[in-house]
Image (tube, rainbow, N blue to C red):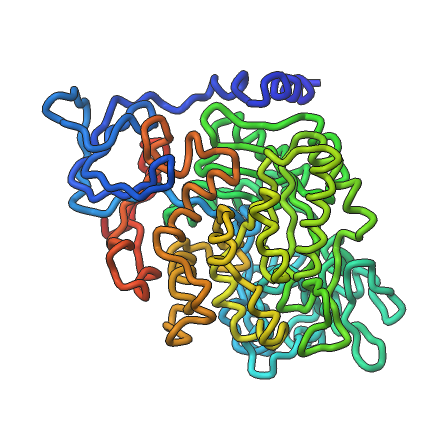
Amino acid sequence: MKKQNIYQKIRKIGMLVSCLCLIALPTYANTLITNIKGYTLNTEGKLITFSNMLIDNGKVVANNVDSTTTKIHQTIDGNGRILLPGLIDAHGHMLGLGAMLTKVDLRESTSADDAARQVADYAFANYSLPWITGGGWNQELWSDRAFPTAAILDKKISNKPVWLRRVDGHAGWANSKALAIAGITKDTPSPVGGQIVKDADGNPTGVFIDNAMELISAHIPPPDNDMNTLFLNKASEHLLSLGITSIHDAGISRRVYDFYLKQALQGQLDIRIYAMIDATDPELDSMLSNGPIRDANDFLSIRSVKAYGDGALGSRGAALLTPYTDAPHQHGLLLTQPEQMTPLFSKVIGAGFQLNYHAIGDKANHAALNEYEATFASLGGESLRHRIEHAQVIAPDDLARFSALGVLPSMQPTHATSDKNMAEDRLGKERIKGAYAWKTLLESGSRLPLGSDFPVELANPFYGLHAAVTRQDRNNQPVNGWYANEALTIEQAFKGFTLDAAYAAHMEDTLGTLTPGTWADFILVNQDIFSIDPKDIWKTQVLATYVAGKQVYSAPEY
């Protein structure tokens, strides 16, 4: 009954004000940040500079204040540093990042054997764990570029079940112990929207793609509140150290929904979270019925749903209109079947929620755009700023439809620089022209919220800014940029990680800029990203991070 009363209060005005105003931020005397070179966008998206900033009660009062005529209670010397708005990651996985920071990380593995060795070392150091979990492996970076097998893991660790997600989160690798616990045999069929990879004799190899991953993951005990608190704190600390003050959490379960509500009510959120409800959660209807949530201090907002159209390009799960160039017998996988789309879109949009649809392949993007168009014609809802998450491979005729329909392409620049070694193999020279098409989408009239998709990619937003501007990896390859015609300017990329990301969350009134009335979320960094050589943007270091005027991170050397 107590939980129902809370939800009734939420529904009454669509916010948690009635509960959370009791746990408001501390009142800070007005503070002037001086001796800085500040950059922000104004409400029209124009880049402006300022030399000082006055804040009060956690919000910006004014820029370029005349301190001789303004009563100042406290002054902070910025020591000549560059000041930027806190950056917003428009697509990440908060607790997934926290879990990754506490589990085995295979990003640097050089082969399946090397990954298995790292897993065994981790298991030895964490002997009390009933399951060994982690991820980050990417067979495309290994010399043989082949999927790993259970047998490789079995050689290193066979007494405990192991489950390791691929770097993109759309495939998993299990050992034989995990297969046995899940009851997976050669007779186990692949589920709709997924694949149990099998060898020439029909035996499962240990790799599961997309919907098939649930066959293994369903047997792993879910984290309890204590573990989720650990994951949240680990992720928050990491993101704040990188200059990220707000994130869009792309797909939360009912368990996490309730956890976030509790954390917000207790004033325990250190970073701003715009959470998307997982469309596959059995309690979706119940969460929709609670209505949109936005707390008084903008630390938690829940007014969107994340749906899943297809898989990822690296595992050939992205749904394509024509077969993969390097695998002519494969078209990818649709995770939401065509007959399920209309009921889903109608339910979510009809409830007044933003619908954020994961679509990587051109077939999934085309289907999503068609469904948005049909739903708008029958129900309306265009003003809800619906999104396609990733919008990675788009048929040429569909590029302009984003702007025409008002659907936002929510994209992640480092996906392009991570995928460049395999994307053209998958798509061919013609189809690649509609992939990672940031500039084309922007010039067609779309706003472009940007993020990282952490922990699939590293969360550092300066890596994303660098990739967006140079179309290069951090080794400055390729020399002239990968399909550099789609590169953004630094101002355009900065807007994607600030104002456009805030707009994509319906929060541009209080986030994304440092104009009067917005929250004083800002960072001090060691170099001017607007004047340095673009190839060095990724080297930017965050010296201090402030949320609502309160310092929440300081670099050891600062």
Closer to the camera, 189 or 3?
Answer: 189
Closer to the camera, 205 or 306?
Answer: 306
Identify which residue is drawn at 47% across, 70% down: 483
Closer to the camera, 82 or 98?
Answer: 82
Identify which residue is drawn at 62% across, 68% down: 314
Image coords of residue 501 (percent x, y): 47, 43
Identify which residue is drawn at 47% across, 18% down: 21
Q: Is residue 368 visible?
A: yes
Q: Can residue 132 be seen in this view?
A: no
Image coords of residue 385 (percent x, y): 58, 38
Closer to the camera, 277 or 319?
Answer: 319
Identify which residue is drawn at 65% across, 22% down: 7
Where residue 399 sits, quadrant-wise, is bottom right
Image coords of residue 209 (percent x, y): 72, 64
- Left or right relative to 246: residue 347: right
Where's the N terminus, which quadrant?
top right
- Left or right relative to 458: residue 198: right
Residue extending farthest left: 68
- Left or right relative to 514: residue 66: left
- Left or right relative to 531: residue 291: right
Is residue 260 shown above or below 394?
A: above
Image coords of residue 2 (percent x, y): 67, 18
Number of marks: 0
